[in-house]
Amino acid sequence: MATLQAIKYEAGKLDILDQLQLPESCTYISIENVQDAWLAIREMKVRGAPAIAIVGCLSLAVELRKLQDGQSKEVLHNFVKEKLEYLVTSRPTAVNMQLAAEACVKLSSELLKDDSVEAAVAKDALLKHLEAMLASDIADNLAIGDYGAKDIVEKTGKKDKLRIMTHCNTGSLATAGYGTALGVIRSLHKTHSLDQVYCTETRPYNQGSRLTAFELVYEKMPATLICDNMAAAAMRQFQIDAIIVGADRVAANGDTANKIGTYQLAVLAKSHNILFYVAAPFSSIDFEIPSGQSIPIEERPHSEMTHTGSIRTAAAGINCWNPGFDVTPAELITGGIVTEKGVFKADQLVRNQ
């Protein structure tokens, strides 16, 4: 069975799977402009660092295709720069959107300075750059999956019956397709190396129970859902071989920001002598940030904790702390950081790897 297609794009038409409606229904919504994309990202109709960048950039491609011909290169450049700077404000922790924006603005600046390039040619070049992201991300995810699966087999010494734990959602719903951490699990399943996946519910937004569980059932992978506070017991009870998670940003020293709850899994993994991996495209590594202490952490609405849907489940008046992410120190990432370029220890990360 093919993996879920959460992002559909063709020649200026962009549709995304509304993840707020999963698992009850698979409903696609149309993204007509950058404002639509910003709202979809902010409201978490689309989430996952790679998917955020792709949807953001493709929404700009939609607008560029609608932009009236005959605009000067200066107008085109300012248009692209303004739209991308706005998109970066949608979710502050995930670095992929920021890096994608910087790369596109750089290209636009180079085209602007090149007097031999006409405005129409510059526009086509920018469209080609933006629209290439979808296929490129899928290729990167396939490579991440294969590198990670091979490394887990080698380091555990087990070719089958592997028991893997994961957190949040890192599959087709968080990327252009296949996934990062879930892509590694897919690759293990593809080679008949997987015995069972244990996915956490991922409170308070339940991306694990709503989204990861949905993908695992959809693709008929052997899987078990656990509550977040069952992780330590599950590690001991089921003799977990490895834990693999995604990343919204990796600092230059290997410290990693990921969905809240990741840090505690890394601490528990060390206590239980379990390999702990982070899977992410190389674009998630922010070499401008020296350590995890400098990664901005998004604060989410208190209602995610106090309500289930429209029903209040917490005492009225209680104060809440609801960070969307936490930071796992590099020394706890014992398995390595899995990228499309290979598996690296934190001290092996190099900007131009």
Image (tube, rainbow, N blue to C red):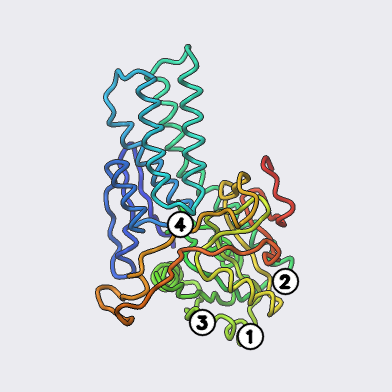
**Identity, as a three-letter code, of the amino acid under mark 1:** Arg
**Residue, disc 2:** 156
Q: Are marks 4 and 2 in contact (CB under 8 Å)?
A: no
Query: What residue is pinned by disc 1?
Result: 236
Give the image location of residue 23, x and y in percent. 33, 69
Q: Residues within 10 Å of mark 1 (few under 14, many from 20)?
A: few
User: Is residue 64 left or right of 275 when viewed as pictured?
Assistant: left
Task: Name the element at disc 1.
Answer: helix
Q: Amino acid at mark 3?
A: Asn
Is disc 1 in contact with disc 4, using a CB cutoff of under 8 Å?
Answer: no
- The image quadrant that residue 350 belongs to is top right
Q: Amino acid at mark 4?
A: Gly
1 or 3: mark nearer the eye: 3
Mark 1 or 3 closer to N-term?
A: 3
Q: Residue at x 28, y 78 (%)?
A: 312
Q: Using the image, tell me which numbered label, if any, was put on residue 48.
A: 4
Q: Position of residue 263 (x, y in %)?
A: 58, 69
Q: Which mark is residue 229?
A: 3
The extreme top residue here reads 116
- Disc 3 to disc 4, how far (Cα)? 23 Å
Query: Is residue 178 shown left or right of residue 121?
Result: right
